[in-house]
Image (tube, coloured by chain):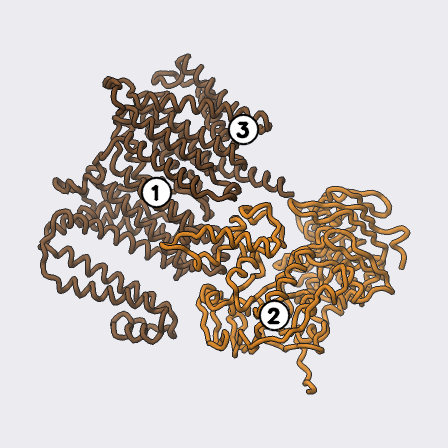
Chain colours: A orange, B brown
Amino acid sequence: MTTSDTNPLLEARRICKDFPGVRALHNVDLRVGRGEVLALLGENGAGKSTLMKVLAGILPPDSGELSLDGQPVRLDSVRTAVARGIALIHQELNLADNLDVGANIFLGREPHRLGILDRRTIDRQSGAVLRMVGLDVSPKTVVATLPIGKQQLVEIAKALSVNARLLIMDEPSSSLSAKETETLFGVVRELRSRGVSVIYISHRLGEVEALADRVVVLRDGENAGELRRGEIDHDRMVRLMVGRDIAQFYGRRARGAGPPVLESVDLETPAHAGYRLNFSVRAGELVGLAGLVGAGRTELLRVLFGVERALGGELRIAGRPVAFRSPADAIRAGIALVPEDRKQAGLIVDMTVRQNLSLAALRRHRRRFGLLNRRHERSLADAMIRRLNIKTPHAGQVVRFLSGGNQQKVVLGKWLSMQPRVLLLDEPTRGIDVGSKEEIYELMEQLAADGVAILFVSSEMEEILGMSDRVLVMHEGRLSGELGGAELSEESIMHLATGGARAARES
Amino acid sequence: MKKALGIFALLVFVYALASLLNPDFLSTYNIQNTLRRTALFGIISIGAAMVIIAGGIDLSLGSLVGLIGCLLPMGLHAIAAGPPGRALAWTLTGTGLGLWCVGAVWLHSIPFRESLRRGLQVLLVPGYVVYYAATRGRDCKRPAWLYLLGLVSVLAGWLLPGVPLPVWAETALAVFWMLEICAAIGLLHGVLITRVGLQPFVVTLCGLLLYRGLARWLTDDQTQGFGTGYEGLKSLATARPCSLACLTAAAGLCLAGWGLYRWLGRREDDADEVASVSPWCLTLVGLALSLTSVVSWLPGLPEAARNACTWTQRSMFWVGLLGSAAGVAALSLNALRHRSWNVLWGGAAAATGLLVLWRLAAWGHVGSADADLAWWRIASVGLALIAVMAGAVRFLTASWTSTAGWRSATFLTASAHALLLLGMIPLDRVQAPAPLLVMIAIALLVGFFLQQTVYGRYLLALGRNEEAARYSGINTAAMTVLAYVLCTLLAGVSAVLFSLDVNGIQPAGHGNFYELYAISAAVLGGCSLRGGEGSILGVVIGTAVMRVLYNAIIMLGIPDKLEFAIIGAVLLAGVAADELLRRSAEQRERRTQS
């Protein structure tokens, strides 16, 4: 389809948007044709959400133009955007789940007579749009009782009822089961045949291949390339997203691993009691922990670090059984955790770089009577800043003002100074620019080469595939399988992550 | 340091205003009184600041002061009335039991398949403790020692023969009991908050009610007093060991010495420490302070007449005046050169306000008791006051830029203002009250603890972000308990001094609202109620502001009814100004980042 070239529905030219300290979008162009499914790809922090917020009227662009049907337009509020036919469906659905379907569809623009709701019109018109998306529930159904997949269709119906011509869907399938995703695809195709355009944001490259007419890739806030129908394939998409060949980017050279440092025997986490987890990580090994959101990966790391006590089972560090009552015990045993939310649990954002880097090591290097060892603190901070290439004007800079990538490096630096035996990473590169990502990957490689056992949780398939020697896959609290070597692929991981059973291995 | 500057400017303003409007404010008696009250409230404010910095709050401090105030005389009488040596026995037993319980609780918290039966075993059977400690190794050594020490103390207390004690030992024991009670209460607060998981506000609110009720019940609402005797103890609160000039001379020497120490051990990259000031600055101020303090004692100078200015006062005043004038001029010129409008606006506002006040005073509209309060006069006075206050604060804090040179200049100007203030009182005639020395010692210790020790850093981290502190291996529960215990201990010290300060201790009212004063002083001094922020210097200056304000209200004849309103208004203004300043500083920082 080449409707995007002539007479596009929406055209965005040279959009720029800056936030304090971060350039989110720089001269981004986007064209959406009529009745087209456009996939928007990019890593975290590439600018996809910002661009969508600009299109949906949530954020005003700093510069650039938008035009709809060839006419220049200014979307200064969500209302304006909706009035012009642009609707955004967030990843976390914006439904009032205590109200019924009809009320949600007409939220904010309820038909009324002298202030009294016109229930009949609501029911009639909701019924019509619900039929359009193929959802056969009564408009009087309370939204909270519907499964997530159907809730999403309610959102789409809501968008259609305001005569949306452009639907922007942000990671719609992230919380859907496989079957619900198929239904969603059907709806999207139906919409396309009706002439409604869809911008589809997703990390699931398989879905993009199946659904999209065109793919636009953003990288670091700029256009990174475009692929048309015939050109869409996995490798090309990754190459555009990452900027270079996947094999080079994640240059994991398999190395011989040492003895097992971290062993979990029948470990039961409090979040998913009843499931016993058995696995081990060797010195010098990079083990990835994959799974969908809610599979229990973060909870497992928290039990390994002593934040929560295991309900049962045993943990062994270098062969010695341990029972952690608090993170302090785990740290003494040589374990370090880089948490998922670095601002909440990884750093003290109002303290300086130097203070954050030395926080875990203070006790070890204190002087008599508990005095701070400022000289050591200073030298440690300088050493870590140099080693990790942390970009900060000086070591006394408050961490709040650093970029995400540099903040993550500060967290890593804090742990490196303790020389841990086991490093646990929870989404180490979430929300980080590509340059820092590379540096963190290099660091992980170096640490593995030095004999540190690394267990990292990641939701990015490329990262898991590219950096792991082995992958442990979790599904709803249990370890659904372990993959290594040749059997490591996106399909096999996804299969295990969505609950598929492990086929018997032919040895 | 920046916040301390702001509150210091406020202090200068209030002080200058009070002394302008009623010269009696600067009389020896009044200054001594204010110093004493500042010291007493300063100690309890430092305690409150510790807890606030750790992210909690303690509302029970006032009631604790009341309780201790009632218990101290009761304790003294009980010791004096009983057979000799019984007090020591009680002390040992009580302390021993306390240690026993702490040890038992600690041991119980180390998991060994928790069960009530085992808990009782630990409490009742010492042998089990020894066995357990021996088999479980390193972790259990410390609580086991505490437990055993407690056991030994209890036994000693029971078996000790009656030993006659000298009077000073009896009073020391009584004070020790009070401090123990406070520590136990602090421990209780800490345990309830960390182990049981209750909110600090709720726990200490209940404490407020409980301790007041206990005090009233134990004393049967009778006014308590020390009677005759206990001169030694009373002197703790009423003695005047040295003159203020001695104190300032010593302080000046210490400051100069510290400056020298920093200069000698200097490191190259100290420049990026935003809060630091050049060492030579400190030395200069220290020398100026100590030299001007001792001028009166130089041989060859004529003795000053009764009501005339002493030589010390004169020299300090002039040094302060010249220094202030030079400093203000230098800062203004610098602001003009760099076009820092903040500074200039601040200075202009302060100057205009002062001018208006001066004119109004010249027309006899301000400060005269029989002036009729026409609305425009009140309004103009009020506006002028606000202008001067805000302007002074703005001027000083905005000059505190990130350049070391101008930070030093601001520090010197502020110090010159301090000298000016000090120069308005007859330093060598004013006697420094003993509580002031206690407060200074405590402030130095606590300040040192917060800034220079690992545990102080842990407290600051814990206050800012408890989760991140825990994830970095800090034992947040232990640090929280420590903060609460230190707070109540300091409150106990101040309670002992407070009770010695008044003639009769009324169980229903003694210490009422003291926690509010303490928290206000801490907040004024820069402790954010969110936690993790605050300096002891700021807290001390905050206490001084509140006391001077209170004193000024009395001196100016403003009716008592308005006292709370004025203090509340000043507190609100101070906190609001602080928040606005913080936000604008953050925005400025962000702009320089991007």
Dot 3, how many residues are within 10 Å of its Cα: few (below 14), some (14-19), or many (20+)? many
Chain letter of the residue beneath label 3 in the structure image: B
Q: Tell me whether circle 3 and circle 2 mark residues in contact (CB < 8 Å).
A: no
Residue that mark 3 sits on: B343
Q: Decide which of B59, A225 is in the foreground and name it.
A: A225
| Residue A472 seen | yes
Q: Tell me whether circle 1 and circle 2 mark residues in contact (CB < 8 Å).
A: no
Q: Is residue A129 above or below residue B429?
A: below
Give the side of residue B474 with respect to residue A416, left or right.
Answer: left
Chain letter of the residue beneath label 2 in the structure image: A
Query: Could you tell me how far apart the alpha carbons at marks 1 and 3 are, in whole angstroms?
Result: 31 Å
* Corner quadrant of residue A188: bottom right
Residue that mark 2 sits on: A295
Residue A244 horizontal/vertical position (percent):
76, 61
Look at discs 1 and 2 and give the one toward the viewer: 1
Dot 1, how many residues are within 10 Å of its Cα: few (below 14), some (14-19), or many (20+)? many
Going by the numbered disc 1, the residue's amino acid type is Ala
Quick one: which residue is furthest to the bottom in this view? A507
Give the side of residue B62 with respect to residue A35, left or right.
Answer: left
* Disc 3 element: helix
Give the side of residue A124 with respect to residue B487, left or right.
Answer: right
Q: Is residue A303 above or below residue B324?
A: below
| Residue A149 seen | no
Q: Are marks 1 and 3 on the same chain?
A: yes
- At a point 44% along the width and 40% down the height, the residue shown is B526
Going by the numbered disc 3, the residue's amino acid type is Val
Residue that mark 1 sits on: B443
Q: Is residue A489 above or below residue B24?
A: below
Residue B366 horizontal/vertical position (percent):
39, 18
Query: Could you tell me how far apart the alpha carbons at marks 3 and 2 are, in whole angstroms?
Result: 56 Å
Residue B437 horizontal/vertical position (percent):
28, 38
- The tag earlier along the polypeptide, 1 or 3, is 3
